[in-house]
């Protein structure tokens, strides 16, 4: 059993290395020749390298956030965006780009990507505070899940209204952000994105036991001395930070948080969550790296939206799994 797990992880690590090379060499309009690599290669070090590292970080954060929520709610369809965290980020970006531009509120203050990132983080943080406050009052995971969905719908409705009344240029900028992108992150951005993501992912190590217990339900958790509400509070906070951070730098990216944890459970049948956490880190990274390579390779000199690729990969997988596992 342990030998099979080791072999599977060896295969995943090998796939990660291969996917990383594919993203570095083919993740753009021009194929990079290994013979041309040097410290002065601008395309490689300033465009391809940060994009590949961003794909790895985004894959790790979204997949892990999805795993946490699926364990908490014991629902394979729970994902990073189910609690409205991403919707909060999108709404705040919409307010900044659409309402701000239309009303000329941010005409002088708007500073491009930095302001969008700040807006997305702010929106995620505000919704997270609301969800955490509600989680202290609500015992039922189902009710909390439904409240999160309603918050998401409300944010979406306000966002739609802003889109309806916005001008064409602002709407195009917002729609482009909403498609998700791995290529907007620079090496400087990574000095912020990477350490925060790493520290947040490391915090999960302190919640391995609660994750294993929560998978078996509230009663079991309390019987072995796990404080259900407290553990759920911190795990939702971790998931929200991971989701909000990646949404801020990359825009909303679909299906990684839902499909990858399900795929992990297909590959590893173990109930030990530390195995699935490591598996999600690898599979999430591999999926986004391959999606990045595909988005730049399907049509010559055209970079397709990353959301389109992840949806084509994730949606059929989820549908297939729903039919295969009717007990879900």
Image (cartoon, rainbow, N blue to C red):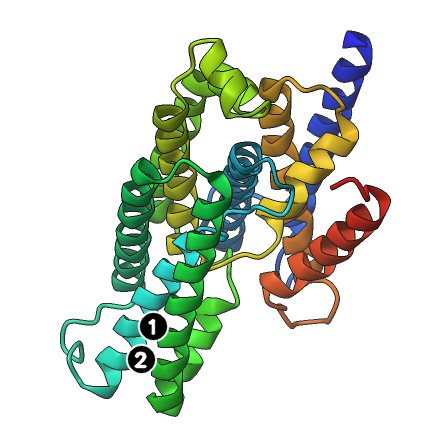
Label 1 CA crowd tier, 10 Å (few <14, some 14–19, many 20+): many
On the image, which quarter does residue 248 sit in? bottom left
Q: Of residues 52 and 135, which is closer to you in this image?
A: 135
Q: Position of residue 110 (x, y in %)?
A: 21, 71
Residue ID at (47%, 68%): 178
**Does any portion of residue 215 appear in the rendered image?**
yes
Q: Of residues 317 and 144, which is closer to you in this image?
A: 144
**Residue 269 as seen in the image, left or right of residue 62:** right
Residue ID at (69%, 41%): 19
Give the residue at mark 2: 98
Q: Are marks 2 and 1 in contact (CB under 8 Å)?
A: yes
Provide the secondary structure element on which disc 1 rests. helix
**Residue 280 as seen in the image, left or right of residue 134:** right
Q: Position of residue 25 (x, y in %)?
A: 66, 49
Give the residue at mark 1: 94
**As drawn, 175 above or below 92:** below
């Amino acid at each position: 059993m342990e030998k099979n797990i080791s072999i599977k992880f060896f295969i995943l690590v090998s796939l990660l290395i291969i996917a990383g090379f594919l993203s570095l060499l083919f993740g753009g309009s021009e194929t990079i020749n290994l013979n041309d690599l040097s410290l002065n290669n601008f395309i490689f070090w300033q465009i391809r390298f940060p994009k590949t590292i961003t794909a790895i970080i985004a894959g790790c954060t979204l997949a892990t956030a999805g795993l946490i929520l699926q364990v908490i709610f014991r629902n394979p369809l729970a994902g990073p965006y189910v609690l409205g965290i991403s919707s909060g980020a999108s709404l705040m970006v919409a307010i900044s780009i659409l309402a701000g531009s239309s009303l000329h509120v941010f005409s002088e203050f708007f500073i491009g990507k930095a302001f969008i990132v700040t807006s997305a983080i702010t929106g995620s943080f505000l919704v997270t505070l609301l969800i955490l406050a509600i989680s202290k009052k609500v015992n039922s995971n189902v009710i909390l899940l439904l409240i999160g969905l309603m918050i998401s719908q409300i944010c979406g409705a306000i966002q739609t209204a802003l889109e309806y009344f916005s001008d064409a240029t602002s709407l195009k900028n917002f729609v482009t952000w909403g498609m998700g992108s791995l290529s907007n992150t620079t090496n400087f951005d990574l000095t912020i994105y990477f350490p925060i993501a790493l520290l947040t992912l490391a915090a999960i190590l302190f919640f391995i036991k609660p994750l294993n217990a929560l998978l078996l339900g509230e009663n079991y958790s309390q019987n072995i001395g796990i404080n259900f509400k407290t553990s759920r509070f911190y795990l939702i906070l971790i998931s929200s930070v991971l989701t909000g951070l990646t949404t801020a730098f990359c825009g909303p990216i679909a299906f990684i948080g839902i499909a990858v944890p399900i795929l992990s459970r297909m590959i590893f049948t173990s109930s030990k969550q530390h195995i699935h956490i490591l598996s999600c880190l690898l599979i999430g990274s591999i999926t986004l790296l391959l999606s990045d390579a595909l988005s730049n390779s399907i049509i010559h000199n055209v970079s397709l939206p990353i959301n389109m690729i992840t949806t084509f990969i994730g949606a059929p997988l989820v549908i297939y799994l729903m039919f295969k596992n009717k007990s879900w």
